[in-house]
Image (cartoon, helix red, strand yellow):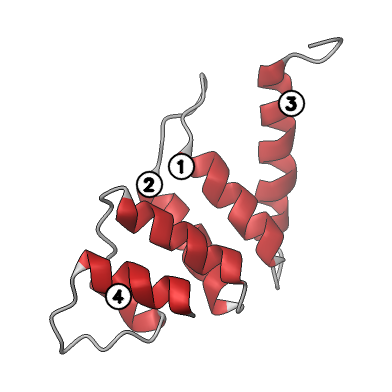
Amino acid sequence: DGLVSRFMQIDCMWKYYNLSTHSERPPSYALIKMGDLFYSSHVRRKRNVHAAVEMYTAAALQRDPQGLYNLGILVEEGVSLPRSTLRQLGFNSSMSVSNFTIVMEMYRR
């Protein structure tokens, strides 16, 4: 690992990307990176799936395909997206949507 431990690297990434997401117009790459950091557990932080979904959704709403892709991966892993998130992404809330339908639509977009 050299001079900088893996934990310190992750802490620095967390600080940098977290600050970036609090700007007036956060860049989508920072939102995606924070989603990744929220989704993966760390010695000093527990996994926060809800926060990861929020970050990926914000990136997807900026038309970043990686945000939709990452949401699709979460759904494939069994994460249920809130109806409000699906509405934000343009899914018709009146129809009964299965996880398979959600994933296929996200990957299609």
Residue at disc 2, secondary structure: helix
Q: Which residue is mark 4?
A: 84
Task: Say whether disc 3 or disc 2 marks the residue closer to the N-terminus.
Answer: 3
Of the image marks 3 and 1, the number of the one nearer the N terminus? 3
**First reached walking from the N terminus: tag 4 or tag 2:** 2
Residues at marks 4 and 2, CA–CA distance in whole angstroms: 15 Å
Secondary structure at numbered mark 4: helix
Disc 1 marks a residue whose amino acid type is Tyr
Tell me what residue is drawn at x 70 percent, y 73 percent.
25
Residue for badge 1: 39
Amino acid type shown at disc 3? Gln
**Residue 85 seen in this snapshot:** no
* Cβ atoms under marks 1 and 2 closer than 8 Å: yes
Task: Tell me the residue at 58%/71% (across/down).
Answer: 65
Q: Position of residue 34 (x, y in %)?
A: 59, 49
Q: Amino acid at mark 2?
A: Val
**Nearest the camera: 50 or 95?**
95
Residue 99 picture location, percent across and down: 23, 65
Structural distance between the alpha carbons of marks 1 and 2 = 5 Å
What distance separates the C-alpha of mark 3 from that of mark 1?
17 Å
Q: Earlier in the sequence, mark 4 or mark 3?
A: 3
Label at residue 49? 2
